[in-house]
């Protein structure tokens, strides 16, 4: 008889008994990384002196590029300027790139800004023929 009681006590139950208490279900919160929205920045576009180009959907005409920057192989008292005359539609603008300043020259175009990023080539001393200048513009 002792063997029968022992076997009954060791018999595992095949299904759990239903719970009579109403315990709340706890779920772990889902953590997501914050969404960062970067402003759209177009790549710089090269526009040669006297030509038209499209910068981020904006039609730009380069009227002239004048470069009085100190040549890179000369010591000067003044850094000089690269001046770009351009038109957007009927509006004329002048952007002056000063090597002594860190801020880039810009003009408002609707809700965006058109920046003069650089003028190439940088002047060199003893060049017989002035090169064709290129203005690099970027829409921000």
Image: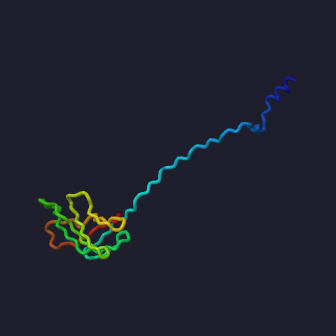
Residue 78 drawn at (x, y percent): 14, 60
User: Would you place residue 34 above or below residue 40 in this image?
Assistant: above
Residue 103 drawn at (x, y percent): 26, 58
Residue at (21% x, 60% y) in the render: 99
Q: Tell me: 30 left or right of 83.
A: right
Q: Quadrant of the N terminus?
A: top right
| Residue placed most toward the observer, 133 or 16 | 16
Q: Tell me: 22 left or right of 28.
A: right
Q: Quadrant of the C terminus?
A: bottom left
Q: Quadrant of residue 121?
A: bottom left
| Residue placed most toward the observer, 12 or 41 | 41
Residue at (62% x, 41% y) in the render: 26
Residue at (23% x, 64% y) in the render: 97
| Residue placed most toward the observer, 29 or 1 | 29
* Type of colouring: rainbow
Residue at the farthest top position: 2
Residue at (72% x, 36% y) in the render: 21
Residue 62 drawn at (x, y percent): 27, 74
Residue 90 drawn at (x, y percent): 30, 76
Q: Tell me: 1 left or right of 59.
A: right
Q: Quadrant of residue 24?
A: top right
Q: Quadrant of residue 107?
A: bottom left
Q: Tell me: 23 left or right of 110.
A: right
Residue at the farthest right position: 1
**How many marks overall?**
0
User: Would you place residue 34 above or below residue 8 in this image?
Assistant: below
């Amino acid at each position: 008889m002792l063997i029968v009681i022992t076997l009954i006590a060791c018999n595992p139950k095949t299904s759990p008994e239903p719970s009579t208490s109403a315990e709340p279900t706890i779920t772990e919160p889902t953590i997501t990384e914050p969404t960062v929205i970067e402003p759209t920045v177009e790549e710089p576009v090269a526009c040669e002196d006297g030509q038209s180009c499209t910068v981020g959907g904006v039609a730009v005409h380069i009227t002239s590029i004048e470069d009085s920057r100190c040549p890179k192989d000369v010591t000067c008292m003044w850094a000089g300027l690269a001046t770009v005359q351009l038109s957007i539609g009927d509006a004329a603008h002048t952007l002056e790139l000063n090597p002594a300043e860190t801020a880039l020259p810009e003009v408002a175009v609707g809700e965006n800004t058109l920046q003069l990023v650089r003028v190439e080539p940088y002047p060199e001393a003893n060049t017989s023929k002035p090169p064709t200048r290129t203005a690099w513009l970027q829409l921000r």
